[in-house]
Image (cartoon, rainbow, N blue to C red):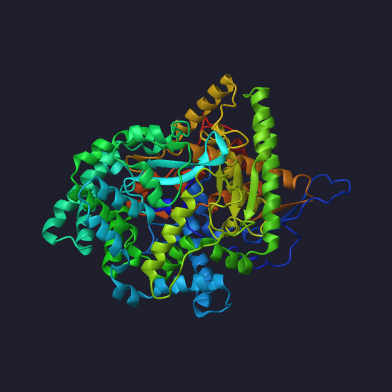
Amino acid sequence: MRLKLRDLRWIVLAAGVACSSPTKPAPLPPINEAPPAEPAPPPAGPQAVKVTLADVGLEASSLDRSADPCVDFYQFACGGWLQTNQIPGDRARWGRIPELDEKNKVAVQALLDDDAKGVGGDAAAKKVGEFYASCMDEAAIEKAGTAAIKPALDKIARVHDAATWQAALVELHRLGVPAVWRTSSGPDAKDSKTELTQLDSDGLGLPDRDYYVNPERAKKVDAYRAHVARMLVLAGTPAAKADAAAGTVVAIETELAKVTKTRVEKRDPVDAYNPIDAGGLAKQVKSIEWPAYWKALGFAASAKINLGTPKYFAALDALRAKFPPAQWASYFTYHLVAHDAQALPKAFRDESFALDKELTGQPQPLERNKRCIEITERELGELLGQQYVAKYFPPSSKQTATALVDALVHAMADQLAQQDWMTAATRQTALAKLGKIARMIGYPDKWRTYDFDVRRDDFAGNLLRADAFEAHRDRAKSGGPVDRSEWQMNAYTVNAYYEPTANETALPAGILQAPFFGQDRAVAANLGGIGMVIGHELTHGFDDEGAKYDADGNLVQWWQDADKAKFEAKGTCVADQYSTFEAQPKAFVNGRLTLGENIADLGGVKMAFHAYRALRKDAPKMYVADGFTEDQQFFIAVGQAWCAKDRPEEIQRRLTIDPHSPPKFRVYGALRNLPEFARAFQCAAGTPMNPAQPCAVW
């Protein structure tokens, strides 16, 4: 399933700047050199050239040389960084990606300031500038109060029967507020060229169903209930009734949580594919007038409608009847003001942050300018992305990154061809799938437009219009062809992705910078940084989810039965191993929740290592950086790309909802299972980084 940008409320994705080049070191022989096209007869061996870690693009200051790399390589690679870096007050996690986020905000801020001043003058820049300026105008926001959401609040206040209940729900869905359930579009998992209307569970105010059903989370639920009460008072609920109303909101959400899939269950694309027609949907959920619902939202549902969680919708009629209309009105009111709190007066914003603080441990909110940058990026992402690429992303970066992606694809093809546990038929199908992966580098070939009004003195109105526009744009694709040129991330995002229904991978410009990438970095450093990321995304096509899709993005069983059984056994090895990793006392990684990302990490490092070796094969010079061989430099680059710290509350939250292992265990888990790492650092058998029973999938 595809994630929309606004789906990521609880999983923050940082963004960064793609600088043209870091400062060049003192003149040296070219470190990033490829072998000559027609080399002279090779000498007895490559010439060793002594350089520094800085020369190859790595950080000596981030190392902890007192740590044994065969015992705790993460401490060895990142110990210096961990000692000298503290988590800023406005962050729950601090690491290399958040560092790039801060760097990115400075660059994007410059673009937005110019746009807000009218520098440049084109219509796109004007729209971006006025949106950002309206977000920064806190005096106007205070003066406007809740006027922008008053029509929605009035509809909610009129809820007294089934018709008015549906009218209120439609208004929230029109504004992009996913109350009760989420309506969107997405590729048909078995006909990936066609968009289907997708319905799935949603409408919880806490990060996950686990908070409602796990007794160990009771204190968080109590804090949430108090927060809901305070938000309802701000929205106009009498203080004397707010506590009871908040209790009802939590009660409704608890019932929704009971029929919501677990995070592990949501990872199964086969279980998430449950197509139904309009008649079948009407029989399953009788309390909704579906034709009126589609019409009110302004789009036609596809003939085939997919239910992500059938048991959830089967329970809706009874759940609606369990709570009287006035109680549902409190639920609707809370979700409206929680969704749009950043556009409302300061009291709403402060209370919204109070919940974030409770859940993540983050002591301070982001400064207003940083918050407005994030909101502008979310709502006008590709307009801002065009400016970003023009100023910060030179063509040479795209060319270099494309060459690295090609190298990773070749390395992965070589590794797939050597998998002796696969039959020839499965291997050939896997190779064909790899060959068809579409590679999207830097930014879209075609930029999106944003057809909604922006007014400089109406931030709340701007936000509501932006969200309504995006919600309608997405749903209106239902029944039409899938646009595979559309990107799911903005150009400045420090991240990458693989989309199984399109069999495509994207590498945005934002991640193409140190410590992941640099045009002046050595091959080993680049492949250990961005190479692992590229390999990770390619491997997603063959993780426990991606392997269920064929080369065209269709949910098809293309494995021979014997191969499938071996593949699943290898995955079980990985899941069981990662489940022993203790992130906090008695708080362990969920090996099943993180299985896909862990398989991708293991495969990504392996493919990147082999790509680095291929690029350096027969090179006439070998660079030894502060005593570290090129193999060792590769692994140091892997470690240094993931140096990070989390607040204790954030660790707990992410262990519940994040499909990625904590950064420490992404490094530790991937490298301890790679024989090439043990050889590079001469780790004795049985040491933590060279276990007796390693796990490997690809």
**Residue at position x 38%, y 66% in the image:** 366
Q: Quadrant of the C terminus?
A: top right
Q: Is residue 483 above or below residue 115?
A: above
Q: Is residue 688 above or below residue 377?
A: above
Q: In front here: 213 or 685? A: 213
Q: In front here: 210 or 641? A: 210
User: Hey, which quadrant is residue 391 in on the image?
Assistant: bottom right
**Residue at position x 24%, y 45% in the image:** 162
Q: How many marks?
A: 0
Q: Where residue 184 appears, x then y in whole percent?
A: 44, 46
Q: Where residue 67 appears, x then y in whole percent?
A: 49, 49
**Residue at position x 46%, y 62% in the image:** 379
Q: Where residue 650 appears, x then y in whole percent?
A: 36, 51
Q: In front here: 401 or 73? A: 401
Q: Is residue 598 left or right of residue 340?
A: right
Q: Is residue 388 above or below residue 616?
A: below
Q: In front here: 204 or 208? A: 204
Q: Where residue 555 appears, x then y in whole percent?
A: 54, 32
Q: Is residue 574 left or right of residue 332?
A: right
- Residue at the farthest top position: 562
Q: Would residue 205 be visible to someone looking at this image? A: no
**Residue at position x 47%, y 36% in the image:** 304
Q: Is residue 437 above or below residue 476?
A: above
Q: Is residue 124 left or right of residue 631?
A: left
User: Hey, which quadrant is residue 553 in on the image?
Assistant: top right
Q: Would residue 133 be visible to someone looking at this image? A: yes
